[in-house]
Image (spheres, rainbow, N blue to C red):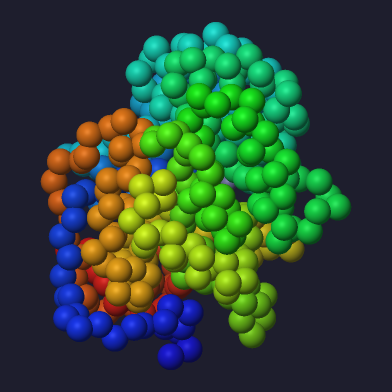
Amino acid sequence: MENHFQHVHIKPHAAQMDSLTITRPDDLHLHLRDGAMLAAVLPHTARQFGRAMVMPNLKPPVTTTAQALAYRQRIMAALPEGAAFEPLMALYLTDNTPADEIRRAHESGRVQAVKLYPAGATTHSDAGVTDLKHCTKALEAMQEVGLPLLVHGEVTDASVDIFDREKIFIDQVLEPVRRAFPALKVVFEHITTQEAADYVRDAEAAPGMLGATITAHHLLYNRNALFQKGLRPHYYCLPVLKREQHRLALIKAATSGNPRFFLGTDSAPHPKGAKEHDCGCAGCYTALHALELYAQVFDGVGALAQLEGFASVHGATFYGLERNPGTVTLRREPWTLPSELTAGEHTLVPLGAGEIIEWRLS
Ligand SMILES: NC(=O)N[C@@H](CC(=O)O)C(=O)O
Ligand SMILES: [Zn+2]
Ligand SMILES: [Zn+2]
């Protein structure tokens, strides 16, 4: 059982389902990168998902509508022939984002969100926001035109323990910004703690005003995965994996049917050499097998019936989008995940490399 997603407790259920067909899903938090990496990873996402919210933390970051539209064109050009996939674009918020840029983004019809990276919080966040007080005009404009704020929800204060950064972000940043801008739509991205799940579930918010994405890796693993018989860089992401108690709270949230919770893989490709390094990059590569990983989790708690809402309905509704046309089918058909993949001149190691996964996309 060693290499077999041992953290998911399989519940016996009355009628075992061996196949599941759902509306084509959306990945509402995704890193596609650029150039050869984009070309290598995009087909994995386009095979499964109808749309994805593409993160703007390129180097340099996507801070203007013009840059977002140009990036969108590069993504469209990298799509495999005949793929029906639509990238949803996000702007990277900085201390200097003018309100006019927000209006241009909205008017383009192609930019669906604005992303807050607290400066220094994660990969390519150095150009991020040092203090939200610099962003008042931009946030007012977002509130006015209805562009959601997506947050990497961690404080960066060096005195705050890395495992507490998300919990403290709720009180220090998230709740104050939601109070100051009551008509701002907010997505708490890649939540990792019980506190975040409880906050999103319980906060007072009209329908469509507050959401959260949950990754497959935070549903599958607790922080022990980082230290399983040695240091495991491919399980290192931000926010970092947490205790089992938190993983269980996330599973509860994701499988609850609550429309505030939806799928966002945070698939974040980094070349193998940049992960297996003395200062390894944060990010797990899950685009290859994203939907299958989520199916594994939902099946593990007997909640496959909730997968379609989480993966294909709640996120689309939040963003005011129609559901995707078409369906995807998953079958119970165990297969072994590849130990690595070629991505142009680079190698990628997918999450759970070498492990057996129960579900397979047809
Ligand atoms: N999640 C990660 O660990 N890394 C992401 C950035 C992010 O989403 O915070 C990346 O771009 O590599
Ligand atoms: Zn992030
Ligand atoms: Zn991310």
Residue 269 visible to the viewer: no
What residue is at 65 percent from the left and 77 percent from the top?
A: 227
Residue 275: percent from the left, percent from the top? 61, 61
Vertical placement of residue 96 versus 153, above or below: above
Q: Quadrant of residue 216?
A: bottom left
What residue is at 44 percent from the left and 21 percent from the top?
A: 146
Residue 292: percent from the left, percent from the top? 31, 65
What residue is at 64 percent from the left and 38 percent from the top?
A: 175
Vertical placement of residue 71 versus 193, above or below: above
Q: Quadrant of residue 333?
A: bottom left
Front-most of residues 203 and 165 = 203
What residue is at 33 percent from the left and 56 percent from the top?
A: 257
Quadrant where the N terminus is found in the figure: bottom left
Residue 106 visible to the viewer: yes
Residue 180: percent from the left, percent from the top? 64, 25
Vertical placement of residue 215 versus 68, above or below: below
Task: Specify whether 297 is left or right of 151.
Answer: left
Task: Specify whether 172 is left or right of 66.
Answer: right
Residue at far bottom of view: 1
Q: Quadrant of residue 279?
A: bottom right
Residue 49: percent from the left, percent from the top? 28, 48
Residue at far top of view: 100
Task: Specify whether 145 is left or right of 153.
Answer: left
Front-most of residues 288 and 14 = 14
Vertical placement of residue 187 versus 355, above or below: above
